[in-house]
Amino acid sequence: MAHETQKTTTFKGPNQILTVVIVALVIDILAFTSILPLLPRTIEFYSLAEKNSSGSLLSTLLRCTSALRSFQASIVSSIISSFNSFPLPFKIGFPSSLDAFDSTKSDIVLLGGLLGSLYSLLQCFVSPFFGRLADKYGRRPLLLVSMLGNILWTVLWIFSSSFELFLLARIIAGLCEANVQLSTTIIADVSKPENRAKQMALVGISFSLGFTFGPLIGAYFGSLPPRYFFFSKYIDLGFKSAPFVNAAFFSLFLLVIETIYLYFNLPETMGYLKNHHSASPNPPAINPSDTLTVSNFKKIKDVYLLYMFVFSGMEYTLTFLLLDLFGYSNRQQGCFLGTIGLLSALIQGGYVRRFVRKLGEKRMVLHGFAGCIFGMVSVALMAYFHSIYWIVGVVVGFSIASAIVTSTMNAIVSLLNSPPTYPMEKSDSGSHLDSHYSDSRTHLVSTKSSSSAQASFRSDSGSKLGDFRSVGQLGRAFGPGFASIIYWSFGPVPCYLMGSVCVLYVYFSFNRIKRLLV
């Protein structure tokens, strides 16, 4: 009886858990994004500090990036020359933005991009492991372990007086970051199926807000003198710190607050709906290892991999395009990206959360793909006509894609592994879930009782969401580099038209997936 009383007093409802997760996620993304605007200048600082050390790791990497850049430029030049040798009514010009950077800055930018790709690759490798461990040991302990790893890499960042230490810190960051993945899994644990996509949109809103304000806050703290931080006025720290150490202290402060907040407020959520909601009289025993479910999950991963490969590449080259066409400054670039982030948050809150139950998850994702196509075609038209007016279409299209695709596809993946805990009626949801359970009763109804059906179900949403995030990170690792080669080789118009055609293929490939949630 005492145990039951304690369990009742410590019970948190779904909305309480959602609040804890979203607050922690916003804090986490603010901490994560604070370093993004400082990466190029951080590498530049280390390169100047080690300019007389030709054998250092950074000097070696910069020489390699210089050779890679020269090799790429020679290939681009030969491709353009060969293409222009044909009797065509138009000629391809060498992008003027290649001349806008000196060689040193170009090498630093390229190395910064490679560090970003390294982070994505590490996330690609570790995401499935975090997912499987979360299914075995629970979401809460894995999330706290991830937070300790985040604190560790930020402490190393503070002490990174050399590039080697900074690189080690970024490697640890890539191996330990699992907050987004596990937060998505927790939301899937506590959200009923008909509300799953609506709640997943909160993750997208968190991302939009974090990526809008995090870099601005990081840039502000990075602009402060090294001894400006409050306690360093009075205490000599006695160690060589990293460049822009105030931003690192800010990130560490946020991560410590987040860890304490999660430790005292987040309960374990694995099996939450099954434990706290009564089961339906005869729930369908949907097995996540069923052949059709596995087949659909593989198709979804393939579609998402191609989409993220294309989208991340097109998104990456946008800043080069705006510099090339209109000479955008860093401030103007920041305003452009911030506008996309804020509009994405508005779309997620005002459109996705309101209409996903009416439209269905699959149709909502298709709307996101359509928005992406619209945005890429707008970029091509903006480049072709050299007209800034098309930037409205660019902002709207990329905002729609950012707001819808990833969060709604996360919901679909989690629903593939969702054991029903109550009867599903047409009046409850206008989504594709209805046909999902209708078909399930025909093909997969268990002849056992309700309790045995629930016992036979083994939810592996953590591992599935980990695998799904892994393929997305794989696309992000290689997409920007490939898109840059296409951009420098053929110019922005062919690059973005090719991107729109690829996303159109993604649209039809996803639309062909039948009985998506079975």
Image (cartoon, grey):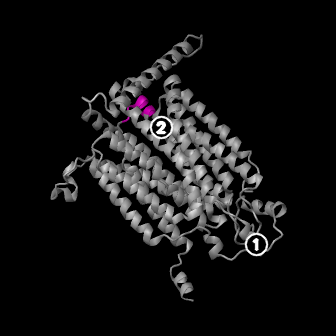
**Residues in magenta, as a range:** 320-328
Which mark, residue 452? 1
Q: Classify mark 2: helix, strand or loop.
A: helix
Work out whether residue 297 or residue 356 is closer to the camera in this orientation and state it: 297
Which residue is at a point 54% across and 36% down the rendered structure image? 378
Left or right of 234? Residue 499 is right
Residue reaching furthest front?
Answer: 55
Give how far across and how far down residue 151 sits, in percent.
38, 57
Residue at 67 percent of width and 42 percent of height: 507
Is 398 drawn above or below residue 290 in the view shown? above
Q: At label 2, which amino acid type do we have? A: Tyr
Quarter of the image with the C terminus in it? bottom right
Q: Is residue 485 left or right of residue 34?
A: right
Q: Is residue 273 magenta?
A: no
**Left/right of residue 406 with respect to residue 103 in the rendered view:** right
How far is the residue under mark 2 from the one under mark 1? 50 Å
Q: Residues within 10 Å of mark 2 (few under 14, many from 20)?
A: some
Instruction: Report x, y in % for residue 87.
Output: 60, 10
What residue sits right under mark 2 in the picture? 316
